[in-house]
Image (cartoon, rainbow, N blue to C red):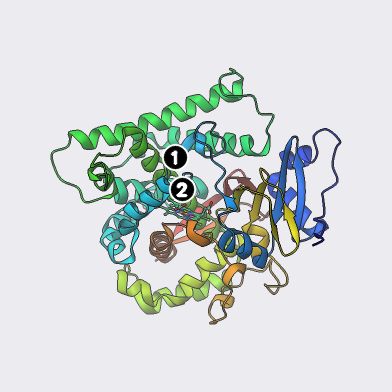
């Protein structure tokens, strides 16, 4: 059977497309889809990549052939996120992943999540209180504030503790770590960690700091006498079905740092981008406030009230379409395979661009427009909308994230007006997650 040719992005003889990718990975992936189509091949130095930007191709690869498109992490030689997360749920594979996913799933079930609402409300109230004290007209960086809020939510709900006293160091260490992780995937020529380059030293420092925070939380729990019913207790008490042994300290550390990172970086970005988009679209904001006023009259919603907030949900869904916090998924092609007559070589890396799929003109009318109404119809979108990924590796925290963002958005929007300091459009920066470049400076005013 003849195979179809996958268009290849023109590049340098030696480095391939590394220069363009390194300069701005987000822009490069958008440009290559526009210029070459929904399936593209490119090369970063010695590494061969495929870029998937079409829902049906994603379904083929991530659902029907998930055994051929696997997580890329190799515990013996970790790269990318595994450098920070080790073998936690996001990065592990095979039996280890299956066992840990089964073990952790009950914590993330919808029925269990409502018990975490009080901690989420408390974190939201603390933010509102802090903002009130700043006084009207106060300038803040919205991205930093949302990061702090989401960090408080994840540590309180999952680990019954707070790390806000170290927020500045944690935020900066995570930024350094995530950027470094993204760089090691993009550039196979990155010097190995044992070579003391400034970037390697900065990464080691950042990851040491994060380790201190995570091990600090675990140690603190081990010496506590009061029982907590949270994810950390579950991890500490878990016993292997066959051997009866507890998890190793390293495995507990990897799971904790995974939930810590995946559980706040993403939701912080959703809240930041949603509030930014609302500030630029007063008609949407007005409609959102009308719903909140009708349903809540200034009160904080409980689980039942959250169910009724259909427009609020549509606003968040649309914000996650336009600015998906996880802009791309990465897999390794584990053996030579074929999809739709296209051949994929074993050992290559596949990038699935959630961003490109969410902006695909065949699936979305006026894809650049912020229009929550499109989520009020019953239209099925399947793989054209996948902010939480798809297939068996779909996000374990999706219901948690929806509950959290709906609650916090409704609290913030009811009590504060948020004005952008600049009318310029905020640029997107992609280092694992899709962040606003340089943050978003805003002015706060209390609503009566
Ligand atoms: C709006 C917020 C969130 C978004 C957009 C998001 C997005 C994603 C995506 C796209 C994946 C799939 C990654 C892949 O296929 O390689 C994923 C996986 C994962 N997410 Fe989320 N996530 C969010 C919130 C959360 C929260 C709140 C938690 C934890 C409390 C969490 C924990 C995880 C974990 C552990 C995985 C790995 C699951 C597995 O492979 O079994 N995420 N997330």
Residue 431, given in percent of the width and then of the height, sits at 60, 43
The answer to whether residue 42 is left or right of residue 185 is right
Q: Residue at x 49, y 37 (%)?
A: 174
Q: Is residue 384 visible?
A: yes
Disc 2: CA contacts within 10 A as few (<14), some (14-19) or many (>=20): few
Q: Which mark is residue 24?
A: none
Residue 267, given in percent of the width and then of the height, sits at 46, 54
Q: Residue at x 24, y 44 (%)?
A: 239
Considering the image in quadrants, where does the N terminus appear?
bottom right
**Circle 1: element type:** loop
Q: Residue at x 44, y 40 (%)?
A: 87
Quarter of the rendering containing residue 63: bottom right
Residue that numbered label 1 is attached to: 87
Residue that numbered label 2 is attached to: 94
**Circle 2: element type:** helix
Q: Is residue 89 visible?
A: no
Q: Residue at x 25, y 39 (%)?
A: 245
């Amino acid at each position: 059977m003849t195979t179809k040719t996958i268009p290849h992005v023109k590049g340098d003889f030696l480095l391939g497309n590394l220069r363009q990718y390194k300069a701005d990975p987000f822009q490069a992936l958008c440009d290559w889809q526009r210029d070459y189509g929904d399936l593209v091949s490119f090369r970063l130095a010695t590494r061969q990549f495929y870029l998937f930007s079409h829902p049906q191709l994603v379904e083929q690869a991530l659902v029907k052939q998930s055994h051929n498109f696997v997580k890329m992490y190799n515990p013996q030689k970790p790269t990318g996120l595994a450098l920070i997360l080790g073998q936690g749920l996001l990065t592990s594979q095979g039996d280890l992943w299956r066992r840990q996913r089964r073990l952790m799933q009950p914590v993330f079930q919808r029925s269990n999540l409502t018990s975490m609402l009080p901690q989420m409300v408390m974190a939201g109230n603390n933010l509102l209180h802090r903002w009130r004290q700043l006084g009207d007209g106060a300038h803040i960086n919205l991205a930093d504030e949302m990061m702090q809020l989401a960090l408080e939510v994840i540590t309180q709900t999952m680990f019954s503790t707070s790390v806000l006293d170290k927020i500045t160091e944690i935020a900066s260490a995570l930024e350094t770590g995530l950027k470094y992780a993204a760089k090691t995937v993009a550039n196979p020529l990155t010097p190995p960690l044992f070579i003391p380059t400034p970037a390697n030293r900065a990464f080691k420092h950042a990851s040491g700091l994060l380790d201190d925070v995570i091990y600090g939380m675990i140690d603190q729990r081990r010496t506590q006498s009061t029982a907590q019913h949270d994810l950390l207790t579950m991890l500490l008490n878990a016993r292997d079905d066959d051997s009866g042994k507890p998890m190793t300290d390293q495995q507990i550390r990897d799971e904790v740092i995974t939930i810590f990172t995946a559980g706040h970086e993403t939701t912080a970005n959703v809240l930041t981008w949603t509030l930014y988009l609302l500030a630029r679209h007063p008609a949407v904001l007005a409609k959102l406030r009308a719903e909140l006023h009708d349903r809540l009259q200034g009160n904080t919603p409980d689980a039942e009230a959250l169910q009724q907030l259909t427009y609020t949900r549509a606003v968040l869904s649309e914000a996650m379409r336009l600015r998906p916090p996880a802009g791309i998924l990465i897999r390794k092609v584990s053996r030579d395979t074929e999809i739709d007559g296209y051949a994929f070589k074993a050992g290559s890396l596949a990038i699935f661009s959630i961003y490109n799929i969410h902006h695909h003109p065949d699936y979305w009318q006026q894809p650049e427009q912020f229009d929550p109404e499109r989520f009020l119809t019953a239209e099925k979108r399947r793989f054209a909308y996948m902010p939480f990924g798809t297939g068996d590796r779909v996000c374990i925290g999706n219901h948690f994230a929806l509950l959290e963002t709906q609650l916090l958005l409704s609290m913030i929007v009811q009590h504060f007006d948020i004005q952008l300091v600049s009318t310029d459009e905020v640029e997107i920066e992609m280092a694992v997650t899709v962040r606003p470049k340089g943050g978003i400076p805003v002015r706060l005013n209390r609503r009566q």
